[in-house]
């Protein structure tokens, strides 16, 4: 079974490639290396002791995508991670985000339709819910106006897939809405490689812990939550990767209830920023220097998943605690600092 993983050298992509190889799938990676490194291939090979094919292709290059599928017409499934993901950058350069995230999706789907039958997993985000009316957030929650062009590309991406599935019964797709992915492979051979100053909480914490940053800013402690800081659902990246394999197998084994489905992927547990800091201090046995700063624009107060649908229909649930996930993140940070 040959599976295409686009963006397979990125954070979630590389962990998913490992899970696929460990389940004996043949994997072909497409990546344009815009926010990843070819060295990740070595990490994947070391962990799995398996071969993986890699093609440096930019999915905006329609001809290159067409050539790829001529060569690999035996692809059985696609997991599509390749996309730009920096919220701030998307506000500064929206057209870059619309072009990159949406044209690549359209070109991929067009080529897949030419193959006749397609199983397609899309990397979506809980950002589509915005500030949800209720937590935990179910898949039925309203899709709120996007807070950034990045978030909008995820909403439009889902719509593109949904409309295509309606028009083309041979296209089977699942959108996976991730909450906050964190951590690294337990081998510390692959992990997150943020470009420049990390925008996300956990890489900022681990960089502070190893001395690359002097202190963490906690963005706001006057939110209407128990300790005043925002609540998120931090999901371990390896658990998340496993859910992709389950979703793909659901499509390949024709277990899906319709040809387009959506699943939340989270732990179901909300943690505040201060909870994460406390958990990190516990596992690292060190004090983390932090100060309370003003709120960050665009942050929602509370977001955590209702995981019932994924638990029951995908037969997947998160297995790793916040402590364990943070420990892998720290081990990875120490490894890349060397
Ligand atoms: C962010 C993106 C989201 C994207 C996700 C990918 C925004 C507004 N949202 O989600 O669209 O899908 O990353 O992982 O950027 N925090 C601090 N100090 C820091 C960094 C973060 O206090 O230095 C706080 C934030 O205010 C937030 C929490 O930590 O309450 C988590 O932040 P982050 O890791 O950036 O994730 P999200 O904002 O949930």
Image: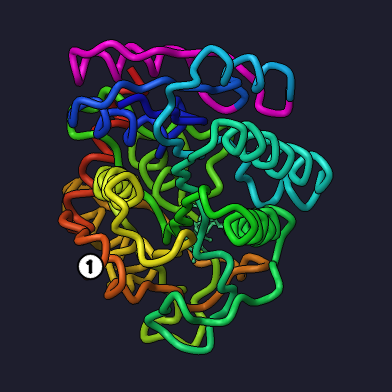
Q: Could you tell me which residue is drawn at 47 percent across and 44 percent down?
A: 120
Identify the element where label 1 is drawn. Answer: helix
Q: Relative to the observer, which residue lies in front, 295 or 168?
A: 168
The quarter holding residue 64 reads top right
Q: Which quadrant of the figure has residue 39?
A: top left
Position of 266 relative to 173 (above/below): below
Q: Is residue 97 among what the camera can see?
A: yes
Which residue bears the numbered disc 1?
Answer: 311
Given residues 268 and 55, the one toward you in this image is 55
Residue 53 highlighted magenta (yes or no): yes
x%, y% of residue 284? 20, 46
Q: Residue at x 27, y 32 (%)?
A: 20
Picture mark count: 1
The answer to whether residue 117 is above or below residue 219 is: above
- Vertical placement of 1 versus 155: above or below? above
Q: Is residue 22 above or below residue 276?
A: above
Whether residue 151 appears in this view of the structure is no
Rendered location of residue 19, percent (x, y): 24, 34
Task: Tell me the quadrant of the picture where the N terminus can be found.
Answer: top left
Quick check: 121 left or right of 160? Answer: left
Residue 102 is a magenta residue: no
Where is residue 189 drawn, in percent x and y? 27, 22
Residue sitting at x 23%, y 49%: 325
Residue at 65 percent of width and 41 percent of height: 105
x and y percent of residue 208 in the render? Answer: 40, 42
- Where does the magenta region start and end? 35-60
Q: In screen coordinates, is 54 left or right of 188?
A: right
């Amino acid at each position: 079974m040959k599976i295409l993983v686009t963006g397979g050298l990125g954070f979630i992509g590389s962990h998913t490639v490992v899970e696929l190889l460990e389940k004996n799938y043949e994997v072909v990676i497409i990546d344009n290396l815009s926010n990843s490194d070819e060295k990740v291939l070595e990490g994947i090979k070391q962990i799995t002791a398996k071969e993986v094919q890699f093609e440096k292709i930019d999915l905006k290059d329609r001809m290159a995508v067409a050539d790829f599928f001529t060569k690999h017409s035996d692809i059985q499934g696609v997991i599509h991670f390749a996309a730009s993901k920096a919220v701030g950058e998307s506000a500064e350069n929206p057209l870059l985000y619309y072009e990159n995230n949406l044209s690549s999706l359209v070109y991929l789907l067009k080529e897949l339709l030419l193959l006749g039958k397609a199983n397609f997993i899309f990397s979506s985000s809980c950002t589509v819910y915005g500030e949800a009316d209720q937590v935990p957030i179910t898949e039925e929650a309203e899709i709120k106006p996007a807070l950034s062009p990045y978030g909008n590309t995820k909403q439009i991406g889902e719509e593109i897939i949904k409309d295509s599935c309606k028009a083309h019964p041979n296209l089977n797709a699942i959108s996976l809405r991730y909450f906050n992915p964190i951590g690294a492979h337990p081998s510390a051979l692959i992990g997150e490689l943020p470009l420049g100053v990390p925008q996300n909480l956990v890489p900022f914490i681990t960089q502070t812990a190893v001395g690359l940053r002097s202190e963490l800013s906690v963005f706001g402690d006057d939110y209407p939550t128990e300790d005043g800081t925002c609540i998120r659902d931090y999901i371990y990246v390896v658990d998340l990767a496993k859910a992709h394999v389950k979703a793909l197998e659901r499509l390949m084994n024709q277990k899906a209830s319709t040809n387009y489905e959506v699943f939340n992927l989270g732990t179901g547990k909300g943690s505040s920023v201060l909870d994460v800091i406390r958990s990190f201090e516990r596992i690292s046995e060190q004090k983390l220097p932090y100060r309370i700063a003003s709120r960050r624009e665009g942050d929602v107060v509370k977001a955590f998943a209702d995981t019932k649908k994924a638990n029951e229909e995908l037969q997947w649930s998160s297995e790793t605690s916040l402590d364990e996930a943070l420990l892998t993140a720290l081990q990875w940070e120490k490894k890349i600092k060397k």
